Amino acid sequence: MIKTFIVAIVLTLMTSCCFAQYQRLIDSLRFELTKAKHDSSRALIQTELFKEYRNTKPDSSIYYGQQAFTQLQNAKYFASQVPMLNDLSVEFRTQGNVGKSMEITFIGLKIAEEMHDLQNTANCLNQLGTTYMLSLQDYPKAIQFFRQSSKIFRELQDDEDNAYMDLNIASAYRRNSQLDSALFYEQKAYATFKELGIVAQIPLLFLQMGATQSGLGNYPLALEYLNEGLRISMEENNDFFNSVAFFRISEVFQTMKKQDSCIWYAQKSLEVANKINFKQQILDATTLLAKLYESRNIDSAYYYVKMSKTANDEINGPAKKLELQKTITDELERQRKAEADRRAYQTQFKQYIFLTGLGIMIFIAFILYRNNKQKNKANKVLEDTLSNLKSTQSQLIQSEKMASLGELTAGIAHEIQNPLNFINNFSEVSNELLDEMKEEIDKKNYDEVKSITDDVKQNLEKILHHGKRADAIVKGMLQHSRTSSGQKETTDINALCDEYLRLSYHGLRAKDKSFNAKFETHFDSTLPKVNVVPQDIGRVILNLINNAFYAVTLRHSKGDDSYQPTVWVSTQKLQNEILISVKDNGPGIPDSIKEKIFQPFFTTKPTGQGTGLGLSLVFDIVKAHDGEIKMQSEIGQGTEFSIQIPEK
């Protein structure tokens, strides 16, 4: 018991040391939020604030989470909306608002299903299972959702998330007093986490195993598991698991009839649960404390009974139950309506097929019947019709061209009008100044002539500035108009790589005269032409090359005179694929972030220099071409991105 107390006290002290650093991080994020202008940047910062506030200020966490979701909607980043909804669902459930939690999860599930996003669909099913298990105590229903989620994760070959599903299934079985089944799924999850090498990073694993061993009567082993789970969650500053761990340890001591230890840990659980407004844990802890103090101190018992009643009303009050019932009823109605619509569509589609087939048969019979008598007349009608169609087609094509040209011209004219106004105004002023100069020359007032000359020179500089601005606007509009058609074309990949390599190099040189890097190409001369969308693949190549040049420039800025920044671009023909490789000798990518580099909004560049969307778009474009992108990196040696595209 003494050892357990010491572990808990030491870990508690560890968390207080991080408070100042945590507050500085919060202040920095809030300051960056005031400067962010774009929806994507604001969403990224608000998401970080949402995560940082989760363990300290739940109301602030929910506020920033809802704001981030709104920004993601505005930016139309659908894939990023569902994870945010799932996180918000957890926050609402933790605070006892089960109806709102389920409503948000159902919204996320609908978005994920409409996008055919299996990963996020599985995550939403997991959230529903967790709500049914923790809040509604409907364990068979929870297991049903967990199994659906697990099935998707197996299809995705996502071993880690599948292991978490095994752990959740074990928890549902344990809560349903099916300890043998719980033990089986725990051991299965443990084996997977051990194979992945992340056993020591999963507090939930040890808390679950501790609870099961307690149910089996193995109290020393249960305390060993629970203390290990508490240690990990303390190190991660995860107050949700901290509160659960303290409470489960108190339950073990209650079973062992060690009431002093039981009270201490129950109070610690209540303290942490109050900190994060974890309603269900507040209810569990106060209920246990009221029972423990019943025979010790009637005032304390009464105090905890009142707290327990308040928490229970907030979670299970009539209004909450009505809200929850309405949410479930609405979702069932939505599913029923969706199924009815699907069946109605199928029936209508079959009717259309039947009527279309019948109409075609009648039409063919009529044509065959009338063919001999009206052959010449029919041919004449067909010729006239074809002529009219061709004429109409030509008119439509010309109309479309003129409409597109009109839109582009109007856009350029609107954007360029402002700098042209400046140019005209400064030109008129300069003319007037030259007239004044002539008068002053006649008066031989050369000091005033020099002053006017300076004014004319300044005006000419402003005319030049706005002229360049107008030129940039025209180029930007033209570049914007070059949208991808989405049509695949037979493309010379070697020529495409060479074009975008030089475009990237000279573009960076134009922006930064001090930029200097070496590049080498190794193109496979036997490489066949392949069918791709050239604009999209060009964007992929340009993005990777820009990142490579950025990496070598970053390393060169460290001041190593012996370092020669170099970028290599190569192509190679494989058996049924082609390989495009972009390699640099930059600083390399740390192992801790390798798994994140393709995620939206993740960037290693300073604020304002990157949105974190470049590699995410690269990943999506390569996948759209049925290709695969791989990354190899070593600290101090450099990074290589390889793209494999099917040859077809």
Image (cartoon, rainbow, N blue to C red):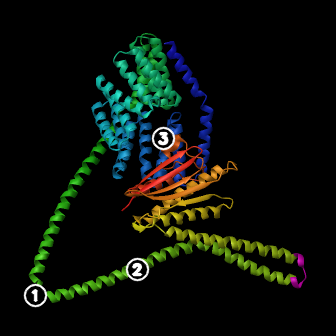
At label 3, the amino acid type is Ile
At label 1, the amino acid type is Lys
Q: Distance from label 3 to label 2 (Cα)?
A: 51 Å
Q: Is residue 637 visible?
A: yes
Does the stretch in magenta take in 115?
A: no
Mark nearer the N terminus (2 vs 1): 1
At label 2, the amino acid type is Ser
Marker disc for residue 373? 1
In this view, which residue lies farthest toward the front?
526
Locate residue 176, reporting x and y percent: 30, 25
Would you call the spot at circle 3 few (<14 residues within 10 Å), some (14-19), or many (20 or more)?
Answer: many
For the magenta stretch, what is the residue range? Answer: 441-447
Q: Is residue 316 visible?
A: no
Locate residue 380, reporting x and y percent: 20, 88
Q: Distance from label 1 to label 3 (Cα)?
A: 78 Å
Q: Name the residue beneath numbered marker 2.
A: 399
Tell me the quadrant of the picture where the C terminus can be found.
bottom left
Q: Name the residue beneath numbered marker 3.
A: 62
